[in-house]
Amino acid sequence: MRGIATLLLIVILQGCIMLRKPFKAADQPAAPDYANEKSWAALPFRKDAADMVPAGEEAVSDSTKPADVFYVYPTLYLRGRSWNANPGNRRLNRLVDKYPVRFQASVFNNTARIYAPRYRQARLSSFTDTKGNGEQALDFAYDDVKRAFQYYLDHYNHNRPVIIASHSQGTFICRKLIKEFFDTPAARKKLVCAYIIGYEVDTASYEVLTPCMNARETNCFVTWSTFKASRAGTGLKSHTLNKLSVNPITWKMDTLKAAGEGGILFDVNRRKRCRTEVMVKDGNLWAKTDAPFFRRINNLHVLDYNLFWFDIRRNAALRVDEYLKRTQ
């Protein structure tokens, strides 16, 4: 618990520190080689952070999983000498593995093999930069993820069902990724679902891809951004505001209050799950949670996955099952 609280505090205090020098591609760290396993935070058939299974859940062999997940993690590069992170930075990679890979990517490990590329993520201040440098840094990060996904398709996929999963900067990137790879009538049939969470998504960006409207629908995407229910209707200004939020318990864009199966915060062996009641209002997800420490924090962005860990886990398995029924 102390670790994630410290991480959140660092994000708050340092996240908007700007880099004075302009973006130049030649100044950024060398590109990752996706033929090298070290360029992946998670891969099937090896031990890594995405293998985390909480108390009460049984591990599933990668050999029996019917689908794949391609997961893109959020921003943890807060400050440095370049606009984009070095994918070989051991300290940064430890943070990536310890938090998002362990608590987000792992949610899918009951039904899918997990692929999570390391990439030259843009520093957090890229989202508030007004001089065009941040935009270039984010485009640079996208290029890495696109190359990683193409490598995955060419070498790992073998026509298996695909789930795209992401959070925050990962979703900023994956909004474009699903546009390029799945936004045609034929291509969308290959997508089980895209869980693109924690960043605004606009349906006008897509020709054929649409939001999922129920828990079993496939060939579609789901998204949400989580805020404390006490702030509903206060006009929060943030790129995490999301007019397309689905309720990750009912899996509908409804206004019904619902309590799910519970979530995981930071102690995976704790038998008591944190409980959260949510509803969709004004396009965003408003939550009432008993999660400690976060009771006084209104923007629950860092918990977009954690609060609904078991609900997402069950839903991914359900959608994969539905996908297989329709395609086999």
Image (cartoon, rainbow, N blue to C red):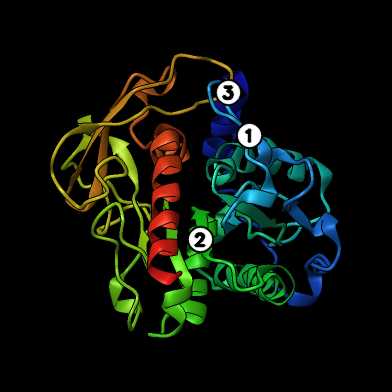
Disc number for residue 268: 3
Whether residue 35 sits left or right of residue 312 in the image: it is right
**Residues tagged 1 and 3 counted as in contact (Cβ below 8 A):** no
Q: Earlier in the sequence, mark 1 or mark 2?
A: 1
Label 3, label 2: how far apart the Cα atoms are = 24 Å
Residue 109 location (% of width, % of height): 59, 44
Q: Earlier in the sequence, mark 3 or mark 2?
A: 2
> Which residue is rendered at x = 27% and y = 43% of the image?
285
Q: Quadrant of the C terminus?
A: bottom left
Residue 300 location (% of width, % of height): 39, 36
Mark 2 burial class by Cα count in 10 Å: few <14, some 14-19, many 20+: many
Disc 1 designates what residue? 59
> Is residue 129 visible in the rendered structure shown here?
no
Disc 2 designates what residue? 163
**Residues tagged 1 and 2 counted as in contact (Cβ below 8 A):** no
Q: Earlier in the sequence, mark 1 or mark 3?
A: 1
Where disc 2 sits, the SS reads: strand
Whether residue 11 sits left or right of residue 155 in the image: it is left
> Which residue is rendered at x = 48% and y = 74% of the image?
190
Instruction: Name above or below for residue 202 compared with residue 16.
Output: below
Amino acid type indicated by mark 2: Ile
Amino acid type indicated by mark 1: Ala
Residue nearer the viewer, 163 or 27: 163
Where disc 3 sits, the SS reads: loop
Residue 325 location (% of width, % of height): 40, 62
Which-is-in-front pick, marks 3 and 2? 2
Q: Quadrant of the N terminus?
A: top right
